[in-house]
Image: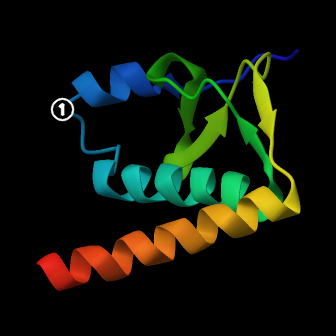
Amino acid sequence: MEFIDGTKMHDVYQSESEEFDKPLLTKRIIESFMKQVLIDGFFHADPHAGNIIVLDDNVICYIDLGLIGILDDDFRKDLCDLLILLQKRMSKVL
């Protein structure tokens, strides 16, 4: 383990400072998690606000990797198929 110099996401949520680009951070966290699950098949399984640090330039850093998950290729393919079907279904509803 090493020291990570940044701001916990929990504190970013409560901050009114303009140094944090909250929409960008939201986008980066979603994209990061989707990549972990759908592409890499290896993901941080406890990504709450206390386990995400924001570094300079709105870079996200996951800490406390004591709980991780692994998904095999078949499961990831099935999950992608499910997400595509849900998206198609929702586009018909909306």
Q: Residues within 10 Å of mark 1 (few under 14, many from 20)?
A: few
- In the foreground, 91 or 46: 91
Mark 1: secondary structure? loop
The colour scheme of the drawn protein is rainbow
Q: Is residue 30 left or right of residue 90?
A: right
Q: Could you tell me residue 82's position as x and y percent? A: 53, 67
Look at label 1 and name its amino acid: Glu
Picture quadrant of residue 69: top right
- Residue matched to label 1: 16
Q: Where's the N terminus, which quadrant?
A: top right
Q: Report the residue at 67% width, 33% height from top.
A: 62
The vertical placement of 11 against 41, above or below, is above
Residue farthest toward the left in the current orientation of the protein: 94
What residue sits 30% from the left and 56% below the top?
23
41 sits left or right of 45 in the view: right
In which quadrant will I find the C terminus? bottom left
x 80%, y 53%: residue: 41
Location of residue 19 in the rendering, given as x and y in whole percent from the top left corner: 34, 44
Please give left or right for residue 27 compared with residue 61 in the image. left
| Frontmost residue, 55 versus 42 | 42
Up-down: is 75 above or below 20?
below
At 55% from the left and 44% from the top, the residue drawn is: 56
**In the rendered picture of this protein, how many numbered marks are placed on residues?**
1
Residue 63 lies, in percent from the top left, at: 70, 24
Where in the figure is residue 4, as x and y percent of width and height? 71, 23
Q: Is residue 41 above or below residue 89?
A: above
Left or right: where 28 falls relative to 66: left
